[in-house]
Image (spheres, helix red, strand yellow):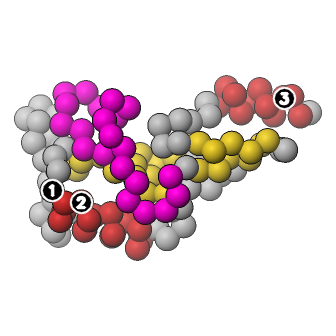
Amino acid sequence: MPRTNHLEFYDVRRRTGFLRNIIIKKLYNRRIPASIVVFNYNDEEKIRMMLDHISTLFPDITSLFYVINDSLNDMITSHEIKLYKGKPYMTEKMENLIFRVGPCFFLSDQLTNRHMSFIK
């Protein structure tokens, strides 16, 4: 889809291109509940086309976010993360505990490993 619609991938050295990253949030329960698509600049038509394509190809994604990051680094936490489709949070369940997880939060492997040793 990106190549057929002339959407350029981001070139780090030249700081050109439209598509920077796609972040897939895979939680403890092994589902793929959310994705964050990172664009280099704001082009509403291209963004809508890309996000619609992703949501059609992957209907199991429950939350689809995007962010415009035109800075030199790849950090997205200092930019506004916008919800395009789905829930504004993901639900993570560990035994009897239920967490609502935002797009920039993740449970580290270390935490999930501690949880697994705790329930044994």
**Residues marked 2 and 1 touching at CB (< 8 Å):** yes
Kind of residue at badge 2: Ile
Asked if residue 26 is positioned above or below residue 47 in the image, the reply reads above
Q: What residue lies at 17% left-to-right and 50% top-to-bottom?
A: 42
The circle drawn on residue 117 is 3
Name the side, left or right, on which 113 lies relative to 69. Answer: right
Q: Does the magenta stretch include residue 78?
A: yes
Judge from the rendering whether residue 86 lies leftward or rightward of residue 4; answer left or right: right
Horizontally, is 96 left or right of 112 in the view? right
Residue 9 badge? none
Q: Mark 2 points at which residue?
A: 47
Provide the major secondary structure of the magenta segment: loop
Q: Residue beneath label 1, please? A: 43
Q: How many labels does the image show?
A: 3
Q: How crowded is mark 2: few (under 14 residues within 10 Å), some or many (20 or more)?
A: many
77 in relation to 50, above or below? above
x and y percent of residue 98 in the render? 74, 45
The location of residue 25, given as percent across then percent down, is 51, 47
First to last magenta residue range: 67-88
Q: How crowded is mark 3: few (under 14 residues within 10 Å), some or many (20 or more)?
A: few
Choose mark 3 or mark 2, whichever is in front.
Answer: 2
The amino acid sitting under disc 1 is Asp
Tell me which label, 3 or 2, sits earlier in the chain. 2
Q: Is residue 86 left or right of residue 53?
A: right
Residue at 47% x, 37% y: name it.
Answer: 104
